[in-house]
Image (cartoon, grey):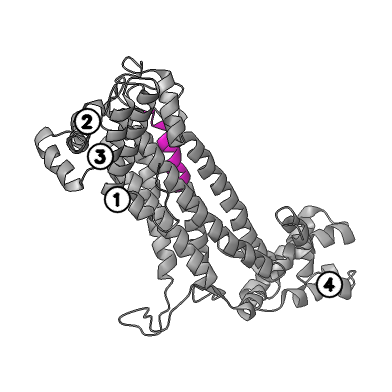
Amino acid sequence: MIERYSERDVSALWEEHNRLKVMLDVELAVCQAWCEQGRIPEEALEDIVANASFTVERVQEIEKKTQHDVVAFVSAVAENIGENGRYLHLGMTSSDILDTASSIMLRDSLDIIIKALDELDEVVSELAKKYKHLPTIGRTHGIHAEPTSLGLKFLNWHSELLRDKGRLEYARKDVSAGKISGAVGTYAMSSPKLEARVCELLGLEPAKVSNQILQRDRHAAVLNALAVMGSTLERMALEIRNLQRTEVREAFEPFGVGQKGSSAMPHKRNPVKCERICGMARLLRGYALTGMENIALWHERDISHSSTERIIWPDAFNIAAFMTRSMTKILKGLVVDEMRVKHNINQTNGLVYSQRVLTFLLDELKLSREDAYAIVQENAMKTASSGVSFLDLLLTDERMKEVNPERLKALFENDFYLRYVDEVFARFFKE
């Protein structure tokens, strides 16, 4: 009954004609359920199904007079059906149709985002495998720390995307609920049996309890899942932005033929695509906050949530789809400068191996941690200020005269730091 959309049609799904079309699907499902219970004659149902239609323009025309969107919609459809239009909206309140229809659109929108996320994760996984054994400098506080693997950086993204997908799938399950329980949720003019059948026809689960609406914790969970996913994409984009900095230059977002970085400075190659993703993530977090504020309503319902949902739901999904597909394009065209990656590891003249030297001294010379730390730190500070090799300073330090020079030199290599990379990858991928 419900028209499904491809991963490219999130905008069309929230377009006004389709929103009303999904509302009509709910109304027709209710009519079918009533017919099965003997409340609506079969010939009347046939007439309803054959003639139920609307135009957006006619709905809007009626709404100008009624000042009620659902009344306008039902009236526009009923007038095309004729006499049997009186069976439309039988035993329902406005939120029965609005909330149930919204659940369908939210569910289908999440399907689109999850599909786009799978496509992104496939690209991330390939990058992780490609650069699994490429040593790169790890940074903490923005400062060179110790060697790591560039592939591990991408694998970390892969792991986070899997968690994002899990949150989206949970939110999809939670929001795939319908309600045909009437004005305050008592089924006064319908029945739980009718609701169950309608939800079955629409591919939803009936809410176990509702009032006039489906409770907005479900919808807040959707928006929070999107916001967390958006923050993951922001984290990825921010990393690329930092790797593209002039002082780093390890990785670059795609830069097309004819693209310009600045109106004044022709040399500029700015990470504008990644910056765009970082900005849009802020919108998703804002919508998530609005979604949480929509949970608390007066008694069985007010409509303070309604005006915001008309904006935040379609906008959030359009933003999330755009961000996800944009990041997929960025990573497909990502330029990694492997020579620069290797160069940057050596930028500090060996300081990044300081922890390994410290541990070696503890084991080799049986020094206290304070004494060993002092030797390493003092020489490290000299290297940082003078540019003299950290290894050379250690080799000429009188306190190190009992250390075998070759054993000390052996500490200054990268394979040691990558020796468990395969084991970590095995947690995610089978060879």
Q: CA distance from mark 4 to mark 3?
A: 83 Å
Q: Secondary structure at mark 1?
A: loop
Query: Which image quarter is the N terminus in?
Result: top left
Report the residue at 62% width, 74% height from top: 385
Of residues 221 and 261, the one drawn nearer to the viewer in this rendering:
221
Q: Is residue 123 left or right of residue 98?
A: right
x, y (%) of residue 70? 22, 34
x, y (%) of residue 128? 65, 64
> Mark 3 touching mark 2, by CB under 8 A?
no
Of residues 109 and 20, the one drawn nearer to the viewer in this rendering:
20
Q: CA distance from mark 1 to mark 2?
A: 25 Å
Q: Main secondary structure of the magenta part?
A: helix
Q: CA distance from mark 2 to mark 4?
A: 86 Å
> Which residue, given by chain and number where applicable, does mark 4 sit on?
410
The residue type indicated by label 4 comes to Ala
x, y (%) of residue 430? 75, 57
Nearest-to-viewer mark from 4 and 1:
1
Q: Secondary structure at mark 4?
A: loop
Report the residue at 36% width, 25% height from top: 35
Label drawn at residue 85: 2
> Which residue, given by chain and number where applicable, does mark 1 sit on?
15
Q: Which residues are magenta?
A: 214-226
**Is residue 53 among what the camera can see?**
yes
> Mark 1 touching mark 2, by CB under 8 A?
no
Q: CA distance from mark 1 to mark 3?
A: 22 Å
